[in-house]
Image (spheres, rainbow, N blue to C red):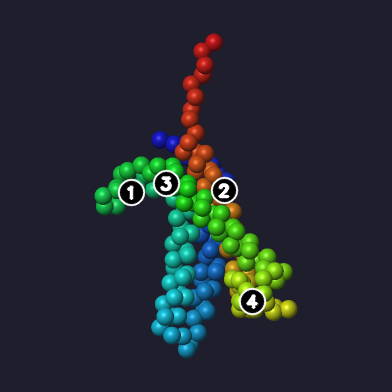
Amino acid sequence: MTSSPSRWARWAAYGVPLAILPSTLYRFTLVPDDATIGEKIYIPGLSIVSFAFALLAVGLVRPWGETVPDWVPFAGGRTLAVRTVVVPAAVVSAALTLAFTYGLLNHFFGFVEPGAAPVLIGEERPDDVTDLGVAGGAAYLPVVAWGPLLAVATYAYHRRRTSVERAPVPA
């Protein structure tokens, strides 16, 4: 049995879905009235899937992140290997941090011209306002914290699960 997660690890893990929540809710307002059936499925679906993935960060500080719940067929009750959790979480954390940093920096400084490479925010870079507007910008800004918060929670999970209590050395 491992020790309980530290307070800062719990804050980081629960902060991930909280950082995603504003953009998730805002995205539901982006479905246009004349949207195709694909858009009506894709836009809310993106919100639901991204929030579901963000909720997985909570597993880094909860028991179900260490042992598969008993109700899961064929795997219930098995202890998860640390590497099985840490490697994907670390890769996703790095990818999210790099992608959102690239998107944010490119949006404000325009390193890449539209069409030359992925812009990530809007089709073109307007000079004075964003395509999302103030409400959209406020909703999407916390998403930038997703990668770093996941990295902190992953580090704490790894440290907690791999720490070995050492017996005192006899004199």
Name which quarter of the figure residue 114 lies in.
bottom right
**Closer to the camera: disc 3 or disc 4?**
4
Q: Please give the residue where the numbered disc 3 appears in the rendered image.
A: 84
The tag earlier along the polypeptide, 3 or 4, is 3
Name the kind of residue labelled 1 in the image.
Pro
* Residue 30 higher or lower than 74, as above or below: below
Whether the residues at callouts 4 and 2 have beta carbons within 8 Å, the answer is no
State the separation of the CA atoms marked 2 and 1. Answer: 24 Å
Q: Please give the residue where the numbered disc 4 appears in the rendered image.
A: 114
Q: Please give the residue where the numbered disc 1 appears in the rendered image.
A: 69
Name the kind of residue labelled 4 in the image.
Pro
> As drawn, which residue projects farthest toward the top?
171
* Residue 18 higher or lower than 46, as above or below: above
**Closer to the camera: disc 2 or disc 1?**
2
State the separation of the CA atoms marked 3 and 4. Answer: 38 Å
Q: Please give the residue where the numbered disc 2 appears in the rendered image.
A: 152
Dot 1 lies on which element? loop
The quadrant of the rendering that contains the C terminus is: top right
Label 2: how many residues lie within 10 Å, few (<14), some (14-19) or many (20+)? some
Residue under the image location 59 percent in, 57 percent down: 97
State the separation of the CA atoms marked 4 and 2. Answer: 33 Å
